Image (cartoon, helix red, strand yellow):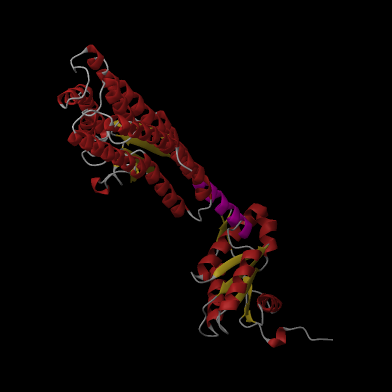
Amino acid sequence: MPSPLSRTRLVSYCAASAVVVAHVVPVLLSDDRAGWTAASLGGIAVLLGILAWTTFRERTVPGEPLLTPALLVLIGGSLSGPVRIMTISIAVFAVMSLHGSARAWVIRTVLGLAVLPAGTALAAATGATTVSWRTADVLGLVPFVVPVGLVMRNILRVLRQQEMMSARDALLSSAGGRLLAAADVDEVHRVGIDLTNRMIALAPGLTLLIVRRQNETWYVSRAIGVDPGLGLVGRPMTAEELARPAAALAELVPAHHHWHGELVGDRHVLLGAVRPVSASEVDAFRTLVHQVVLAEHNLASRAELQHRAHHDSLTGLANRELFYDTLTGAVTRGGPGSVAVISVDLDDFKQVNDTYGHGGGDELLIEVAARLRAGAGPEGMAARLGGDEFVVLLTGLTDEGEAERVALRLRERILTPILVLGQSVRVGASIGISGAAPDPADLLRRADVAMYTAKAAGKNRVERFTAADLPTPR
């Protein structure tokens, strides 16, 4: 759907083209020499081409601010009466004022002031019946070119602002969905940088600096819309500099004299520009940064909820659900003999609880969990199934005795005295190993059977599951 600016340009083009075409008849009926008539008709054709090119290509022809007034003077040479010259001039200038730079508009307007007297003088020189260009009827109409151009330039400014604000609102509307759909913080930052660059592209000359605290010092963590070679990223900033960024950054970003800074969440946001920063721009970038912060918090909350759902709240080890899911995947992917389960049950843990209370028992469990996590290694997983029951998953095993060696080291780790409420406490562990089973449930069950065999044989032992451990059918 065309934008309001595009529709306004199209309507102005159609109206101006109709006015230009309507002047073909007066040119043909003029009493000029045939050569001037043909030249004026050629000027009308070129002028129509310039109007069409500018409107539909949305860019002006090179040299247009000089060419348009010259063509209007040429056409005026075959028009009798200053009103006709002024009518066609106003129509053409109205269209051209909706395009191009302010500099081009000024040049066109200044030269346009001479179109009416020059066209009238040319018409008189070619023999057309017209008034003198020095009369009040001619000179009194000259200034009308200026207000028409001013009105159209103001319309252009307003419509451009509307387009920019609509595009910015569309970006902000899409930002929430994109940021909340991000899988991790790095993706959140990539989306935030992309949206910031696109917003800056709508209003060139803006720069966004994100300043974050690290080890009690503020550092520039992001610099968007500025040359990376300036070395802003990583630059430390004091509280005084954050309060007066224009002075602090004058040497690094000399073109940016206007800065707006504020604290958003845990970071300072500095918005700089080569011109005064508007309130709408500040609001837009503030909203974007707030959405990035919200997305970061959402990811952190989601990660925390997932961690709580899959980990034991006391020890931080994996819980039964996460352990079983991981075990299932390991059995599915691993080859025969590459996966083993070690079941660990503390010996006489009830005595610790009875002696030191549940607080002391919790201290013991937390320390045992830490030792099991360290003993499992980077490729293993330790989990708490409940109470004083733990389990360790080993993957990537290459020989049958590797699991037993790990289990023996785990027993020694647990046997090392533990400080509980300021007292040294020593506990043992009954450990069972299962290294072959048709499915994950059997692998876990057989490790438990081997652990109970170790407990029945005198505790603080390591036993590997064998077929003899299975109960005899009756």
Quadrant of the rendered structure where residue 284 is? top left
Q: Position of residue 243 (x, y in %)?
A: 34, 30
- Which range is magenta? 295-311
Q: Nearer the viewer, residue 229 or 93?
A: 93
Q: Is residue 60 visible?
A: no
* Secondary structure that dominates the magenta span: helix
Q: Residue at x 41, y 38 (%)?
A: 6
Q: Quadrant of the C terminus?
A: bottom right
| Count of numbered marks | 0
In the depicted structure, whether residue 246 falls above or below residue 386: above
Q: Position of residue 378 (x, y in %)?
A: 48, 69
User: With 356 as the anchor, is 416 left or right in this view?
Assistant: left
Quadrant of the rendered structure where residue 53 is? top left
Task: List the single residue furthest toward the right.
Answer: 474
Q: Position of residue 142 (x, y in %)?
A: 25, 19
User: With 256 as the anchor, is 315 left or right in this view?
Assistant: right
Q: Residue at x 67, y 54 (%)?
A: 358
Q: Nearer the viewer, residue 69 or 441?
A: 69
Assess whether residue 463 is covered by the magenta stretch: no
In the depicted structure, whether residue 271 falls above or below residue 397: above
Quadrant of the rendered structure where residue 259 is? top left
Task: List the single residue furthest toward the top.
Answer: 136
